Each structure stands twice: as structure tokens, then as C-alpha cells.
Amino acid sequence: MSEAVPRKLKVATVSLAGCFGCHMSFLDIDEYLFELLDKIEFDRSPLTDLKHCGPCDIGLVEGGVCNAENVHVLREFRRQCKTLIALGACAINGGLPAQRNHLDIGHCLQAVYLSRPGLAGGHVPDDPELPLPLDKVHPIHEVVRVDYFLPGCPPTGEAIWRFLSDLIAGRTPRLDYPMLHFD
Amino acid sequence: MVTDAVVTDADLALESILDRYGRWPTHLLQMLIAAQELDGWLPPARITRLATALGLPRARVEGVAGFYSFLYLRPVGRYRVLFSDNIIERMQGSQALMAALAARLWVEPGKVSEDGLVSVDTTSCIGMGDQGPAALVNGQPLTRLTRERVEAIGDLIRCGVPVADWPEEFFRVDDGVCRRDGLLGLAMAPGAALTAALARGREGWLAELEASRLRGRGGAGFTTAVKWLACRDAPDPHKVVVCNADEGEPGTFKDRVLLASRADLVFEGMTLAAWATGAREGFLYLRGEYRYLLPHLEAVLAGRRAAGLLGADIAGQAGFDFDIEIHLGAGAYVCGEESALLESLEGKRGTPRIRPPFPVTHGYLGRPTVVNNVETLAKTCLVALQGGAAFARTGTAQSTGTKLLSISGDCPRPGVYEFPFGVTLRQVLEACGAERTQAVQVGGASGVTLAPYEFDRRIAFEDVPTAGAFMIFDDQRDMFEVARNFVHFFAHESCGFCTPCRVGTALLKGYMDKLADGHGAYRDLAEIEWLDRLLKNASHCGLGSSAPNPVIDTLVKFRPAYERRLGRADFEPAFDLDGALARARQMTGRDDAGAHLSNAPEAQP
């Protein structure tokens, strides 16, 4: 009697305060995507355009946390995913968006919406639909518990593939030095 | 100088500083310290001039200046008050005193007052734990600060009274010797130990030192004779003797007492080392906090030169030439590590070197160098006078002789105590009158935290080794705060060279502060323990690897002090999420539900 086909793992991905570069790098695993799709299926992800995340095995989070919506999405991921991974430099350290951290967010809003040359009668948008920005951009582990960190800006497709295959196979993911060495 | 249109007095003064130090790049740190006295800080133009005159890249000069806490690349107040911020001074009320002084002078701690008059800030332990709270004002130590004294100091500063004219009593530093044994009880005429060693001949003298089994008093406990022999036998004939007087370990002050009252023993010990190794050059590296001792030490050196105990043909021994130069540090704990000290001595940033090679073969300027602690060198005089066998009769099998302990904290009689090695913690606590003791930190911030069930352990290299710090905490003290103070200390003193230490100490500080702020969660304890392991295993030098010691020990022995700071959740955000939206709420005028965040994820839909 043949073995039962193992259940496909559910994977969700999201980009918070990131540039989608990590997702692009993920797509760079090219033909391995077919192999991957034999083992997983995507839940919420830019690839599926699902807006909410159901119960998942693995969550990949690109980008840091820069506004209230990021916090809600990240918490949903933490609630739904057994294993949560900080994918790339911004999720791990705040990255490029955190360059604004030495500026006062109030002054930023003022400069953009009130005092920009050529702007008449502007006001800071106050529509409740819009998420409010946090005063600083934070790495995701400061908001929720994170299980793994996959560094890189972006991590190479090879690194992402290796990391996910380890995880799927039940091995503790471990990247060799060249995969973590960027200069 | 020829091409410059304007030559100011300061330029001329700088030229004379350059000349005084022979324009040697090895004396860059000394020149920077001297140059800073011209304006109280180091303006960019002065850095440039120094770099040009020494033929060094400007970045190198600024890099050195930027490394040391007591060198300033930005203007500072005409009065700089730095409160010693060790846990002992905090227990003595230093924080309230600093706040009181800052309030009286209308200045925010850490900033220069708008009129440029004064700055008030903290600094790492200045070695006055037995007579604190203490502070430095323009480098001079102020001891036994009280509310009244701080108010008087505030008035003196506001009236612009020069520090030299302040009441002498404010600057009184006591030796505070509470127990004497072989070393502190010794009354030696300068030169007596040297005469005894010379009479034995080089080999005979080294044989005595070997027989004494003297081990280094700086903490590591390396056998002194082995070090001296290795230096003597190194191929390069230009040997160097260095006295490590960079007593920066929080809670230690016994070297200060030796330098203040037994300087002859220290210098004589250096000369004994020179006799053994053939060194002609000696340096005493004096921590910047002890700069007030410099005139005294220079006077002792002058006296010894006049007495023929330094210079050429020392004590009448033809060809025995040796002299000692004092180099100042400028506020960098890491320079107490011998290879960092050598870097600093060469006029560089105090970044520890990779060992091997060890200083005994490749030390100062690559020459064979003996680096010994102040107390070790003083002890060699005892060996010379009494002989090695007599010296070895005191102490334990592996730790001969006595040990000076700097006792501070919760006890009625803090001060310097000399005990034979092998003394138990209990005996020490009884001697200084400590009661209801909950913990003793032996060996300073990088040492061990011992709980009452360990008080029968012994001060000795084979049990509890120590460079001499002995900080006592009674049952009213919060051991988490003790550890947190030390973690802040290490984060401040990390030299920044290696990532595990530079980042690890900062992360550890972040977690300790998170707990202190009431945002701790069980998960944070796991992160702290992981960081402890990382620092221990991955750091470049001993600073990083010992930085987690106070946390490791208190987590084992005083874990409830951590646990009571944890919330009920397994995980707590690192910051106040709703507070982080406050500025945006203010700018948009919004106060709807979406304009708020809860810190507890369960509360969200």
C-alpha cells in the first residue's frame, strides 16, 4: 500500500514596511517554485491576493512595522501561523524605512502636507480609513514573538529556498556563511 | 606654520606640547590630553594641526580622541561635574544628588548649560566607593557628597570660583586602610628591596621570585616569575616594563591607595622587574580618574632619580639603566586589559589585540613587555626583602601571600583590607561589620555574584579569584538593579571593535531596561540567556565575555528579582504601541478606535 500523500503545508507571506524586494527574491527561486508548490500551498500572500490569513504552518513577514495597520496584520500572522519568520533586513532591524527614526513624525507630516512649496490649503489626512504612522519604525520582533530570522537585503533566492526546504523537511534552518555574507 | 596667516597663542601652546612629547606619534594620547587643557575641548582645527604635525591621517587622530570618554570633540562646560555611577554610589544616593545639582544649576544632565558654564553627567566608577558618593569636577575627585555639599558646589560654580579655590575638604581622599598585613604593614626605605635583589644577582633574584609563586593581582592570576622569565628570554633585547594602574573595575580602589601612599613600593617593583628582564624603559599607565595623583607620583619618581634608584647605573650597578614614564589614560575601562593598554600606550584607540602573540614577546611597539598590576609589583618588594620561601608561607597552596580587597557597599567600615589568601567571605564580612548580607559581588562587575550559601568560599585563585573588588549588598537591595547597573556599564565601556560585544551589550541593556520599565515577559528571559551565551562565546576579548556575568549569576541566584518584573503574557512588545501613535493622533486630530492600539494582542479583533 502506498504512503498517504503528506498534507501540504500552508504558507502565508506579507510585506509590511518593506519594498517587496524580499518577495521578488522569493520569486527568484524560479523553477524550484514547482517543487515548492508540491509541498506547500499559499494562504494570504501578494501571490494569492487573499486579504486575511487563515490557520497556517509558516508565515513569512517582509518589512518592519511603521503604522497601526502593520501591527494588526502582524498580529494576525502571529495568531494564525505556527512558525513566524522575519524575512530580510527591514523585518529584522527596521532597515531603510527606519532611517526616518531620527526625525519627528509630526514634522514629517507637516513638511509633506502643510508646508511643502506650492501646496495651498493642505491638511494632514485624517480619514479613519488610513492607518496612523507610528512615531518610529520597529523590527517585527519588538511587536510579536518571532521564531526565525532570515537576514539579507534581500536574502538571495537560494537562501530562501534553502531555509524553506530545511523548515519543511523538519531540520533547523541553517545558512552557510556565503549565504549570509553580502560585501 | 609659515603658510598660516594668523598664529594664535593656542597654536604656539600646541607647538610646545608637540615639542614636550618629542613629536612621537606614540604620545598622541598624551598630547591630546595636554592639548585639551587649552580650551577644555579639542576643536577640529587643533585635531587637524596635530595630525599635520605628526604626519598622521586626520581620521586617526580624531579616532583616538573620539575613543576616550574624557576627551571632548565638542565644547563642554567650563565646569564639568561627572558623578561616579557605579551601583555602590547609586546606593549612596548619587542619582538624587546629581538631580539636585543639575536643578540648582538649571542644566539638564548630559548637556552643557546654555551659557557654557557647566555640564553635569555621570561617569563609570572613579575608585572612591568607600567614600562616596563621589564625582569628578574638571578631573579632580570630590568625595563624601551630601545634599549640603552639592548645594555649596552649585553656588561655587554659579559664582565662577575656580576649582583650585574650592574648600580643600571637598577633595579629601582617605586611604581608608582598615586591615594591614605583610604589604600594608611594611615600612621600607626606598631602595631596600632593590639592594636585596641586586645582592642576589639576576638569577638569584628570579629564583626567589619563582620560589614565592607570586601570581598577578590584576585578576587573571598569571605566575609573575613565568611572565618575567618569558620576557627576559624573548629574542628582542629592548624589553619594557609596564605597570597597569588603570584600575577601572567598578568597586576597586586598592591600587589608588598603593599609588597614594606606597608609590615607592610600586616603582621599586617596576625596577625589580627591569633588573630581572633587562628592561631599560618603564611606563606607569595611570587611569584618567587618578590624574590627581600625578604630581605626587612625579615627585616620587624625581626623588628616586635623585637617590640613584632610577636612571643610569641604578644603585651603583654599572649598566643597570632604567627609567619610568607616566602615561595618562582618559576614561576607558577596556584599557585595563593589557593589550588594549599597550595600544593606548602607543597613542592609539584602546582596542584589545588578538593574542597570541602575548605581550611578553610582542608588547609595547612589538617589544617584549612585562605588564603587571600595581599590587603585584608592590608585592615583589616583599619577595625581595623576605625571600620567596617566606612569602609563600602566607596564603594557600595555589595563591601565596596576601590580597588587598576594596570593600564597599552595605557595611559600616568600608575601605581597603589586606587579608592572607584563603580568607572566607564570611570572615571578610565580619571584619567590615556587614550584617544581613544578601550578596557579595567579588571581582567587580566582571566578577561573580555570591549568595549567602557561598559565604564559606575562599578568596583565592583556586576558589574565588578577584582583582580586589568586594561589593556588599544587604537584604534591602534589589539584585536585578545591581545587575542592570553593571550591564549599562559594559554597554558604555564596550570598545566597539567586535560586533558580538558592541551589539550584544546594547541588546542586553535593552532587555534589562524593558524589564525595569515593567514590560518584561517570560520570553525576554530566554532572550537574555541566549544573549549571555552569545557574549560569552563570541566576543573578541574579556570585556564582552565577562559582560553577562552579573546577569548569569543573578538569574541563577536571585531569579525572583527578575520574575517579579514579568507580566503575565509570554510576550510583551518592546515599546508602548499606543504611545507610539500619540504624535500622529496629535497631528491628525483623530481619536477614533483605529487611531489606538492595545499593547495586549488579545484585545484586538
Image: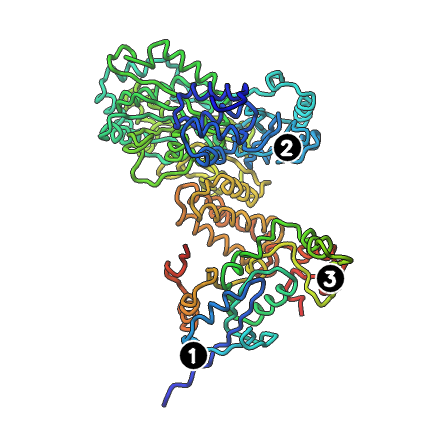
Chain letter of the residue beneath label 2 in the structure image: B
Q: Which residue is mark 3?
A: A125
Chain letter of the residue beneath label 1 in the structure image: A
Cα separation between marks 3 and 2:
39 Å
- State which quarter of the image contains the C terminus of chain B: bottom right
Q: Which residue is mark 2?
A: B112
Instruction: Give the crowd class for mark 1: few <14, some 14-19, many >=20 residues within 10 Å.
Output: few
CB contact under 8 Å: marks 3 and 1: no
Give the number of the mark in front: 3 or 1: 3
The three-letter amino acid code for the residue at tag 3 is Pro
Say which of B168 and A52 sits in front.
A52
Residue at 71% x, 61% y is B596
Residue at 58% x, 28% y is B135
Q: Quadrant of residue B23?
A: top left
Cα separation between marks 3 and 1:
44 Å
Instruction: Give the crowd class for mark 2: few <14, some 14-19, many >=20 residues within 10 Å.
Output: many
Residue B104 coordinates in the image, percent (x, y): 71, 29
